[in-house]
Amino acid sequence: MKLEFSAGGIVVKEEANKMFILVAQHSQHHGWVFPKGLIEKKESGIRNQESGRETKEEAALREVEEETGIKSKIIKPLQPVTYWYNFEGSKIKKTVYYFLMEYVSGDTKNHDWEMENVEWIDIDEVENKLTYKSDKQVWQEAKKEIVSNH
């Protein structure tokens, strides 16, 4: 069994008194997801002495920007999501640390190759657009936060 740790974000944008959420369609499995990716090792010189890895927050902000073209800021952490998957015959336990984020700048046209589509969708359409149970699970918590703060 292998352990994997990722971080990502649920980005909110308010426009014309409506709430929009950033979602992306993955280029490989074509599922609609929230942007996320592996927490990476840091280059020497900017190393976190304890782990040598970027923080969950750094990884989440970086992945959101790389995969969607959107710069954001963290509002608050959400409950981590854990799931299992198989890759090349290995069973992998993946933990994803999600953060509720607010749009700062950027354009979805500037997304990277990992995502074939990136869209801002109405808050009421998110549940039906998402492909995976783990994304739907963290969305329930994020939506409560968003609704209670607006």
Image (cartoon, grey):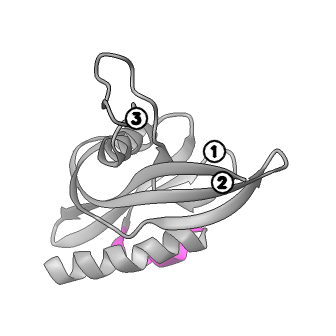
> Residue 146 location, x and y as percent?
24, 75
The residue that label 3 is drawn on is: 53
The residue that label 2 is drawn on is: 30
Q: Is residue 136 magenta?
A: no
Q: Earlier in the sequence, mark 2 or mark 3?
A: 2
**Quarter of the image holding residue 79?**
bottom left
In the rendered image, the vertical position of residue 47 relative to residue 127, given as above or below? above
Residue interval drawn in magenta = 122-131
The residue that label 1 is drawn on is: 27
Q: Nearer the viewer, residue 48 or 27?
A: 48
| Quadrant placement of the C terminus | bottom left
* Amino acid type, mark 1: Ser
**Quarter of the image holding residue 134?**
bottom right
Regarding residue 124, the answer to whether it shows in the image is: no
Per the picture, the main secondary structure of the magenta-coloured stretch is: helix
Q: Nearer the viewer, residue 124 or 81?
A: 81
Q: Give the residue at x 19% y 64%.
A: 14
Do labels 1 and 2 touch, CB within 8 Å?
yes
Q: Classify 10 Å Cα crowding around label 2: few (below 14), some (14-19), many (20 and above).
A: few
